[in-house]
Image: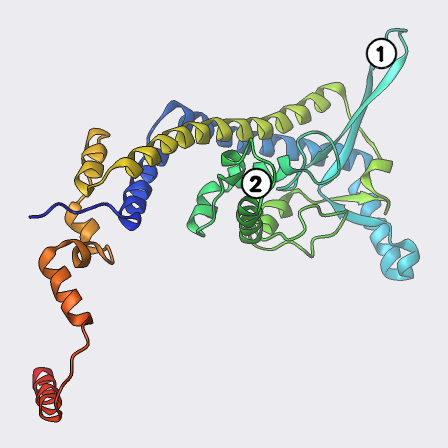
Amino acid sequence: MSKIRMNTELRNKLFNKIKHTFENEDTQEREAYLQARESVDHHYKYASELAKLVVERSYPTDDVATLRHFKKKYGNPCDVVAKDKCFYFSHNEDTDEDGDTKETKSHFDFGLFGNLNGSEYEHEEGKKFAVAYFREELKAKDCNPDIYAQQNENQDNPHKTKHVDACMKALGSTSHHSYQGDMSNQTGLTKEFDNPYYLDVIGTSYCRSRAIACTKDEYSKFEEWRIAKGNLVAKHQTWIDTITKQCDQLKIGLKAYRYLSEGIELATELGIQVDEAELIRTNSTGLTIYNPSNLASMIKGMKNKTQTREAKILARKQYEESLN
């Protein structure tokens, strides 16, 4: 058998198969990422239960029910109860260098795209958390949840924007920062993720103007939860960095190989079994172009030939007979 020459399609098939193996190997970096995601679930459960306790301490459920009763009775003038998933929590248990009491407060957003730096404004870190958390779900939707990690050192560009937008759409959010009570832009995974964390608050102004009192210990627990989210982003970045470095070298090697057998030998050395026949069978041009017999037939078929009327009738008759 003649050697099968490499082409772009075969290189891409080999590259994707080997990359898929890299992504599913039980490495320390992948395990750290998976553990970080489990830790996020644990911290979310604890912090959301604590948030409910702290918020209802400031806005008792009986008061909320009473105000809703008056709204039903008197309408908009009594419309002062709303749903929210982000809160300013504060405590006054610290002192400054003069011994005076000082307020410590920060913004904590329980939504999927909630910031990791304490700001109430939209930030890329929240999106990085979202794609890292729902990585498998996004992969299943043919999205690239690793785009932020892969483009970590690059500025915004069309390639990055294209994949980020696709991820955001797949997650079900076109407006990633939802203001108080605004759940209209949420669908799918975003809505499913955010819904459990909405709590009743009194006051229609933005959360910045209504800091909710908590203890220093409670505040620390909220910080631990937010740190756990940031840790997931960091572990995802570290894991994808290792895959990217391997894939960069893989591209260089595959580009240099002239024959398919060299690529298969590389895969074998990496412990990855590749079926050459399957690669060729599913390849649109491999056998047709590089097998001498098939190539000759293809070229002959391209030649202009003059056929008599009798020859055309005979060819048609033979074709019809072959169908029976």
Tag 2: residue type? Ala
Q: Quadrant of residue 18?
A: top left
Q: Quadrant of residue 207?
A: top right
In the foreground, 290 or 149: 290
Q: Seen in the image, is 219 located left or right of residue 69?
A: left
Q: Seen in the image, is 140 located left or right of residue 89?
A: left
Q: Seen in the image, is 7 located left or right of residue 77?
A: left
x%, y% of residue 203?
86, 44
Compute the Cα span from label 2 to label 1: 36 Å
Q: Is residue 306 above or below residue 126?
A: below
The residue at 16%/53% (across/down) is 290
Q: Residues within 10 Å of mark 2 (few under 14, many from 20)?
A: many
x%, y% of residue 33?
46, 29
Tag 1: residue type? Thr
Q: Residues within 10 Å of mark 1 (few under 14, many from 20)?
A: few
Badge 1 is on which residue?
95
Count of marks placed on residues: 2
Question: Do tag 2 and tag 1 residues touch (Cβ < 8 Å)?
Answer: no
User: Is any part of residue 34 visible from this angle?
Assistant: no
- The C terminus lies in quadrant: bottom left
In the foreground, 27 or 323: 323
x%, y% of residue 8?
31, 48
The residue at 68%/51% (across/down) is 175
For marks 2 and 1, the one nearer the N-term is 1
x%, y% of residue 293?
9, 59
Badge 2 is on which residue?
130
Q: Quadrant of residue 294?
A: bottom left
Please tell me whether mark 2 sits on a helix, a strand or a loop.
helix
Q: Residue furthest top?
A: 98
